[in-house]
Image (tube, rainbow, N blue to C red):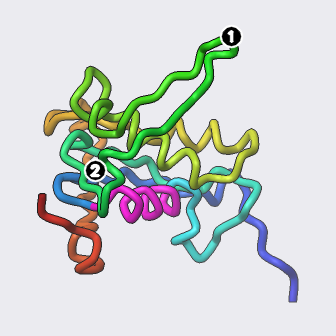
Amino acid sequence: MKTYTATPADIDKKWILIDAEGLVLGRLASIVAMRLRGKHKPSFTPHMDMGDNVIIINADKVQMTGKKREEKFYWHTGHPGGIKSKTKADILEGDHPERVLFQAVKRMLPGNKLRNKQLTNMRIFAGAEHGMEAQKPEVLDVASMNKKNTRTA
């Protein structure tokens, strides 16, 4: 029996809509990363972009467990004395709250050239409005998959 390898003609991409309101950040990011890679499909091929197109709305209302919202994370600009810090709460209340979810999903994908291609299939919106109605996305109810996926503030 030969090993099955998908070709570009075999790839069937769907549009998925996820409402992130009240969902736990890490659990949501792992589900989105799995959908972007295509690991939920029986025809998964690791070196192909097999994943679905994912639309995430209400990214500013995502929840975190424990004290992760108040913990600082640091980065360095590369200049002397250029260490910077911010909390996730500051970013979620700032101008671009979708960056927290984007970075969480990005870090769950393998660090290769295919990651950039797969990340272009994800659209994140801070509010409830999105301009992707023409694609007729299917709603994926992440909250009903597991009771631990949701958290009330």
* Above or below 136: residue 67: below
Give the x, y percent position of residue 134: 25, 36
The quadrant of the image that shows the N terminus is: bottom right
Give amino acid for label 1.
Pro
Disc tally is 2
In this rendering, would 88 be left or right of 79? left
- Residue placed at 70% from the left, 44% from the top? 114
Q: Residue at x 43, y 64 (%)?
A: 31
Question: Where does label 2 land, which residue?
Answer: 137
Residue lying at the far top of the rendered structure: 79
- Please tell me how crowded label 1 is: few (under 14), some (14-19), or many (20+) other residues with Cα within 10 Å: few
Instruction: Tell me the magenta residue range.
Output: 24-35
Q: Main secondary structure of the magenta part?
A: helix
Question: Residue 151 location, x and y as percent?
Answer: 19, 66
Disc 1 versus disc 2: nearer the observer:
1
Mark 1 sits on what residue? 80
Instruction: Say which residue appears at 28% left-offset and 67% top-offset.
Output: 142
